[in-house]
Amino acid sequence: MRRNFLKVTIISLLGFFFTPLKVVYSQSKKIFNKNLTKEQKEILFNEATEMPFTSDLLYENRLGFYHCANCGNKLFSSSAKFDSGTGWPSFSESLPGAFKTKVDYTFGMKRTEYHCAKCGAHHGHVFNDGPSKTGKRFCNNGLCLIFIPSK
Ligand SMILES: [Zn+2]
């Protein structure tokens, strides 16, 4: 499992360095939030990945919901969040209908990529090595999420 995490980290880092070369954002995705930073746009619309261990959300333990930074769609409950040790916010399950998935073969590795069902923005990849009963590990870029606490 550790080895797999390392492999994923390296591939994600490669993705981070190479994706800025692609400058045209996909036409099927729509920018709702006009205040998105350049880095957020690279991840949401150009499939880039943020550097691991950079998200403040890794340390977010309050009750609440995680929303799409672009359109505000409610994606995860805090009850599904866990510390995977990978450096990205991780969840055992998404809220029903929150995402659409697509198989991604970048760098010769088969991974399942997921996009916001409402705006089409890229959020991360889902793996089948999660520790909980769902067996899933949603590996989400923190910059794509906005946390709204319940109280
Ligand atoms: Zn969205």
Image: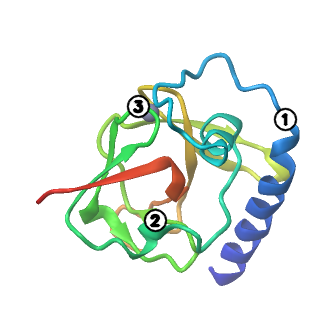
Q: Amino acid at mark 2?
A: Ser
Visual colour scheme: rainbow
- Which residue appears at 72% of the width and 69% of the height? 9
Does the rendering let one see residue 140? no
Can you give x and y, in whole percent of width and height, for residue 144 in the image? 50, 48
The Cα atoms of the two marked residues, 3 and 1, are separated by: 23 Å
Residue 150 quadrant: bottom left
Please report whichever mark, 2 or 1, sits nearer to the chain's N-terminal start. Answer: 1
Name the residue tied to disc 3.
71
Residue 22: mark in rendering:
1
Task: Say which label, 2 or 3, has the lower sequence index.
Answer: 3
Q: Give the residue at mark 2.
A: 90
Which callout, 3 or 1, points at the residue further toward the start of the chain?
A: 1
Amino acid carrying label 1: it is Lys
Asked whether 79 or 49 is in front, the reply is 49
Query: x, y percentage for residue 75?
Result: 35, 44
